[in-house]
């Protein structure tokens, strides 16, 4: 029993030693593992810190880039606004220029039209001042505008049978234009106006002047017949007969000569 107890005691002692030794062997790996976890944790923390720093840096950079982009966008917007403003100003200026061009075009057209009117007016005045070719009783001559106008004014009352006004106008024309190509016609119609006024002697003088100045005048034979009529009105039959003989001798083929012969018969 004692041996068995001693054997058990030795076994227990060896077991304890072995357990202590195993415990020591097991204790060392645990401490190594704990040490390895701290290193890993520290590495992870360092990595996390670096990652967070990188993220922060990226965020800062992104924020900076965003700010730059926003600034560029703002500049672009301002540039676009300035460009739009300039375009509006250009449109406004172009509109003003178009309006000014239209106004200038109208002004130029008005000036051209006025110039044309002025030139036409000048041409008309020049034409009026220039002598014009006129034909009266088969006679062609040159007369200025005022001369022609005054002749027409003097003849107007004659056409209406207003003998006094006609005689006054024709006599005034004679005084103003003594060498006019109208004078033969003026003498004939002045004699008729005086006859209408019963100024027979004055009428005879006018008709005689016509025959003396232009015996080949188309109205010369008629003027002599008018002299006969005036002499008959003055009861000067002898003079009337002599004038009929003169008329028949000078213008035998004329109608006036035939009419004069008929009057001469009545004078017997």
Image (tube, rainbow, N blue to C red):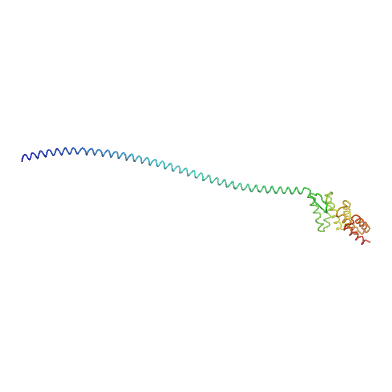
Q: Check the picture and name the quadrant holding the C terminus.
A: bottom right
Query: Horizontal placement of 213 versus 82: left or right?
Result: right
Q: Check the picture and name the quadrant holding the N terminus.
A: top left
Q: How many marks?
A: 0
Image quadrant where residue 64 sits: top left
Of residues 152 and 16, the one drawn nearer to the viewer in this rendering: 16
Residue 235 position, x and y percent, is: 92, 59
Of residues 206 and 259, the one drawn nearer to the viewer in this rendering: 259
Query: Horizontal placement of 116 versus 225: left or right?
Result: left
Task: Check the image and report above or below for 236 versus 12.
Answer: below
Residue 202 position, x and y percent, is: 88, 55
Task: Check the image and report above or below for 33 versus 172.
Answer: above
Residue 266 position, x and y percent, is: 92, 62
Of residues 194 and 183, the one drawn nearer to the viewer in this rendering: 183
Residue 121 position, x and y percent, is: 72, 49
Task: Check the image and report above or below for 118 versus 28.
Answer: below
Image quadrant where residue 195 sits: bottom right
- Quick one: which residue is furthest to the front in this view? 253
- Quick one: which residue is furthest to the left in this view? 1
């Amino acid at each position: 029993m004692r041996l068995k107890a001693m054997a058990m005691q030795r076994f227990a002692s060896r077991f304890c030693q072995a357990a202590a030794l195993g415990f020591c062997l097991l204790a060392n790996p645990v401490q190594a593992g704990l040490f390895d976890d701290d290193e890993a944790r520290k590495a992870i923390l360092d990595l996390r810190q670096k990652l967070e720093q990188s993220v922060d840096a990226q965020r800062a950079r992104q924020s900076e880039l965003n700010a730059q982009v926003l600034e560029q966008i703002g500049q672009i917007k301002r540039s676009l606004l300035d460009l739009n403003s300039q375009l509006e100003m250009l449109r406004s200026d172009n509109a003003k220029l178009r309006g000014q061009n239209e106004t200038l075009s109208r002004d130029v057209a008005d000036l051209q039209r006025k110039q044309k009117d002025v030139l036409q007016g000048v041409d008309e005045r020049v034409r009026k001042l220039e002598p014009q070719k006129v034909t009266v009783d088969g006679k062609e001559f040159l007369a200025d505008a005022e001369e022609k106008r005054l002749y027409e004014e003097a003849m107007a009352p004659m056409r209406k049978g207003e003998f006094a006004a006609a005689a006054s106008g024709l006599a005034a024309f004679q005084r103003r234009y003594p060498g006019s190509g109208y004078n033969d016609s003026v003498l004939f119609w002045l004699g008729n106006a005086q006859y209408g006024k019963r100024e027979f002697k004055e009428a005879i003088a006018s008709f005689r002047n016509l025959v003396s100045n232009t015996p080949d005048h188309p109205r010369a034979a008629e003027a002599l017949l008018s002299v006969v009529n005036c002499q008959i009105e003055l009861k000067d039959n002898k003079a009337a007969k002599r004038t009929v003989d003169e008329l028949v001798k000078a213008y035998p083929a004329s109608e006036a000569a035939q009419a004069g012969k008929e009057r001469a018969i009545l004078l017997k």
